[in-house]
Image: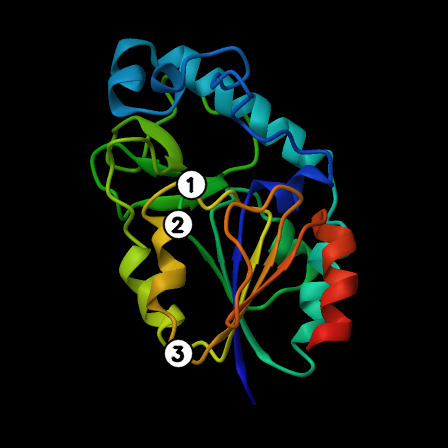
Amino acid sequence: MKHMVVLSGAGMSAESGLKTFRDANGLWEGHDVMEVASPQGFAANPDLVFEFYNQRRRQLLDVTPNNAHEALVDLEKEYKVTIVTQNVDDLHERAGSTNVVHLHGELFKVRSTYDDTDIQEWKTDLVSGDLCKKGHQLRPHIVWFGEDVPMIETAINICQSADILLIIGTSMQVYPAAGLMHYVPSNTKIFYIDPNPAISGNSQVTVIPELATIGMQQLKTLL
């Protein structure tokens, strides 16, 4: 069974009604990114950061996977599918995908500010005073700017074994995630689905300039 590796980004979830965090002007929901997605921002105003992610968490509870998520699940009938996602939502899992790696963390998880490995499920609001078992404040389980991406080595290893690479709903501008496509073998066929593709097609890369839901339907005719 061929190994299909999927790199998914915010465009995948946008069609479910989840806002992409960053607007055209570079603000995240009206906030400078460093205010709500950096260790420095958290240290300066933790309550602002908590509320920012509380709003994202509430929104996630109100949406459902879309046809593109479901199409990836269907591909598991024919391929070994591994999804490496930049998204912090759980829509891939809710749709039924069985092998998902989250590069940038997960909205429905929190972790201790004392011990990065002390991670727990969390679907309600997180506020100051919510503590881990050892008495330390909990924080969103999100990789912020300036922090290491702990799953990047895992993702690189996954890409190195790809027979097919599918890039979907990502601008390919955020590193280190954007560099993952360069780790696939030279004979790996690459498909790129995005309405505003950032890379051009060639003998190895097939570009499908469509939204995720439409592009996934077209992909079926090309595999």
Q: How far apart are the alpha carbons under marks 3 and 1?
A: 23 Å
Q: Amino acid at mark 2?
A: Ala
Q: Residue furthest front?
A: 202
Residue 79 pos. (x, y %): 61, 81
What element does badge 2 sit on? helix
Q: How is colour applied across the structure in the image? A: rainbow
What element does badge 1 sit on? loop
Q: State the residue in front, 128 or 179.
A: 179
Task: Give the position of the N terminus as an image quadrant.
Answer: bottom right
Q: Amino acid at mark 1?
A: Gln
Residues packed near mark 3 inside 10 Å, few (<14), some (14 to 19) or many (20 plus): some
Indicate left or right for 162 with 222 as reference. Answer: left
Q: Which mark is residue 173?
A: 1
Residue on which the image places disc 2: 178
Q: How far apart are the alpha carbons under marks 3 and 2?
A: 17 Å
Q: Are marks 1 and 2 in contact (CB under 8 Å)?
A: yes
The structure residue drawn at horizontal position 50% and vertical position 19%, both measured from the top left corner, is 28
Q: Which mark is residue 7?
A: none
Q: How far apart are the alpha carbons under marks 1 and 2?
A: 6 Å
Q: From this view, report whether residue 222 is shown above or below residue 147.
A: below
For marks 3 and 1, the one nearer the N-term is: 3
Indicate left or right for 47 with 107 as reference. Answer: left
For marks 1 and 2, the one nearer the N-term is: 1
Residue on which the image places disc 3: 161
